[in-house]
Image (tube, grey):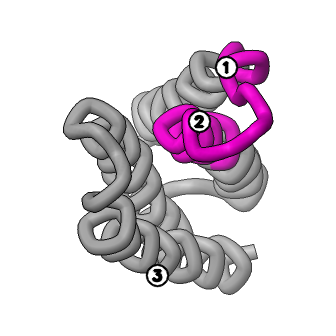
Amino acid sequence: MNKKIIASGALLGALAIVLGAFGAHALKKILTIEELSTFETGVKYQMYHALFLLFIGTSTLLNEKTKKTIFYLVSVGVLFFSGSIYFLATNRLTSFDFKTIGFITPIGGLLLILAWMALFFNILKKKA
């Protein structure tokens, strides 16, 4: 499981860099400042959680069940949160109205919060 978590963190990190560069160069010319800022928020949260997965994958403080739970919460959370933000930021560039799926953004955010809380509570209950 650790290998899968670390590999996923590395992939999410690499994709965050690619998307950040895409936003800074290609999208800068066609998005408003507000839309670009929104897109950048998605990139930041994706990178934060890529680093979080790298930490989880290398940590010896957590059992495998907890790591697996955090991995799935972060994976789906980033997909829902950052993914929906990317689509919402570029909404006016497409014929599909991504505002209709905007409700998944807070669901993704909640999943990310739950991942951090899983870490918090599992560290607290760990015996010294």
Q: Quadrant of residue 80?
A: top right
Residue 76 % position (x, y): 73, 44
- Locate the C terminus and report the quarter of the image it occupies: top left
| Marks 1,2: beta carbons within 8 A | yes
Q: Amino acid at mark 2?
A: Asn
The residue indicated by pointer 2 is: 91
Is residue 115 shown to the viewer in this render?
no
Q: Secondary structure at mark 2?
A: helix
Q: At x 57% / y 80%, what residue is drawn?
A: 11
Residue 21 % position (x, y): 32, 75
User: Dot 3: within a 10 Å radius of its alpha carbon, few (fewer than 14), some, or many (20 or more) residues?
Assistant: some
Q: At x 61% / y 42%, what residue is drawn?
A: 87
Nearest to N terminus: mark 1 or mark 3:
3
Q: Is residue 98 magenta?
A: yes
Q: Is residue 94 magenta?
A: yes
Nearest to N terminus: mark 3 or mark 2:
3
Nearest to N terminus: mark 1 or mark 2:
2
- Locate the N terminus and report the quarter of the image it occupies: bottom right
Q: Amino acid at mark 3?
A: Ala
The residue indicated by pointer 1 is: 99
Q: Which residues are magenta?
A: 79-103
